[in-house]
Image (spheres, grey):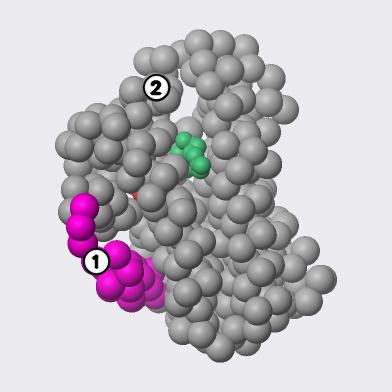
């Protein structure tokens, strides 16, 4: 695997050596971005559609849709079956970023290497763009998914709703806001925040991909554990990158956690222990995929990618 190893908590790829993750991720990103572009044409009132598209089509790794598509394929479904849900996951993720960047929340000027939505369109339109994307995500799944039984789609809608609401992103964000300005937040609270803010949507991405393909209860539990482990590892690495990466690499302001004296994994555990925990979580995630053999290569490689990412 030839990704920049700024953090490099990833393990050697051994049997996955022939799997070219960069090609896989780039192809997935291109495919998802084309589908996202088609998903949201600009109609009247143009301003809101332009604002929604501004953030939806601003790049990013497209990790959540790629996870959804890869899981659906691993469990025997097709990419076509999962694409509307994959797009919806990115719509939800994007709306959470728009709202997170608002002055009332994280108050950030840059995201994905460009000005944040509210900096371009104003707070009022940015709030509405987030709301519009959230509502449209659910409509889009129901309207655009083909050849998937209705009971599986209901499961997807339920899981996405749960991941977004107070049991997921919203709950994590509220606790995060409560902890603002506190530098002595216990590790259990930090885990709660990130299991909800970050891992919940990654879990929904993976489990919904499985659900669309008809995964059974055992598979669903395995997928869920895989995703929660990569989700927490993802956040630990995000915290590490806030210290070690530049704003240019991140596409957003680096060093914000440190400046705000925010409790992070490195501030609680130190850099080395944080890296060790991320490695441990990624190993545990990959272990969940053993029953799927070579079919799990993409998901295993994504776990390695999370361990070695530098942005
Ligand atoms: C969801 C209804 C609703 C409201 C939003 C603001 C909020 C509630 C929640 C905050 C969620 C949040 C911003 C979590 C952080 C998740 C995270 C790690 C984002 C960065 O993800 P990447 O690195 O970003 O995948 P790219 O740009 O690559 O997609």
Instruction: Sort mark 1 into few (<14), some (14-19) or many (20+) by Cα contacts within 10 Å.
Output: few
Residue at horizontal 33%, vertical 45%? 129
- CB of mark 2 within 8 Å of CB of mark 1? no
Residue 4 falls in image quadrant:
bottom left
Q: Using the image, determine if residue 212 lies above or below residue 189.
A: below
Place of residue 243 in the rendered image (x, y in percent of width and height, measured from the top left)? 39, 28
Q: Is residue 97 visible?
A: yes
Residue 263 screen position, x and y as percent: 55, 20
Say the numbered circle drawn on residue 297.
none
Observer-nearest of 195 and 132 = 132
Lateral position of residue 94 relative to residue 296, left or right: left
Alpha carbon separation for disc pair 2 and 1:
29 Å
SS under mark 2: loop
> Does residue 159 appear to the left or right of 217 in the view shown?
left
The span picked out in magenta is 23-45
- The residue positioned 65% from the left and 58% from the top of the image is 159
Q: Is residue 16 visible?
A: no
Say whether residue 201 is magenta: no
Instruction: Please identify the dominant SS of the magenta region.
Output: helix
Q: Quadrant of residue 173?
A: top right
* x and y percentages locating residue 105 in the rendered image: 42, 25
Against 83, residue 307 (above or below) is above
Label 1, secondary structure: give it. loop
Residue 227's place in the image compared with 155, above or below, is: above
Instruction: Mark 2 or mark 1: name the one nearer the start of the chain.
Output: 1
The residue under label 2 is: 104
Can you identify the residue that label 1 sits on?
41
Residue 27 magenta-highlighted: yes
Tell me the residue at 56%/11% (across/down): 182
Assess disc 2: are there few (<14), some (14-19) or many (≥20) residues with their C-alpha within 10 Å of its C-alpha. Answer: few
Q: Quadrant for ligand 1?
A: top left
């Amino acid at each position: 695997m030839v990704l920049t190893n700024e953090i490099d908590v990833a393990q050697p790829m051994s049997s996955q050596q022939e799997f070219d993750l960069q090609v896989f991720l780039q192809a997935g990103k291109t495919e998802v971005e084309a589908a996202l572009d088609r998903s949201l044409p600009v109609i009247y009132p143009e301003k809101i559609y332009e604002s929604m598209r501004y953030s939806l089509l601003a790049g990013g790794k497209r990790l959540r849709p790629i996870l959804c598509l890869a899981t659906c394929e691993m469990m025997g479904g097709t990419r076509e079956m999962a694409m509307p849900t994959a797009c919806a996951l990115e719509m939800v993720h994007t709306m959470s970023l728009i709202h997170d960047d608002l002055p009332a929340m994280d108050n950030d000027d840059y995201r994905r290497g460009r000005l944040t939505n509210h900096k371009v369109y104003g707070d009022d339109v940015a709030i509405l763009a987030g709301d519009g994307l959230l509502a449209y995500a659910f409509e889009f799944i129901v309207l655009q998914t083909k050849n998937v039984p209705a009971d599986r789609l209901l499961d997807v809608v339920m899981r996405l709703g749960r991941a977004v609401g107070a049991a997921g992103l919203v709950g994590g964000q509220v606790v995060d806001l409560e902890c603002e300005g506190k530098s002595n937040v216990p590790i259990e609270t930090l885990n709660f925040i990130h299991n909800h803010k970050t891992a919940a949507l990654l879990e929904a991405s993976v489990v919904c991909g499985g659900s669309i393909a008809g995964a059974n209860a055992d598979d669903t539990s395995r997928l869920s554990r895989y995703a929660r482990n990569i989700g927490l590892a993802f956040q630990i690495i995000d915290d590490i990158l806030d210290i070690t990466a530049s704003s240019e690499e991140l596409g957003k302001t680096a060093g914000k956690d440190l400046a705000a004296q925010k409790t992070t994994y490195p501030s609680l555990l130190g850099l080395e222990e944080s890296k060790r925990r991320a490695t441990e979580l990624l190993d545990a995630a990959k272990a969940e995929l053993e029953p799927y053999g070579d079919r799990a290569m993409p998901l295993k490689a994504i776990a390695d990618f999370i361990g070695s990412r530098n942005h």
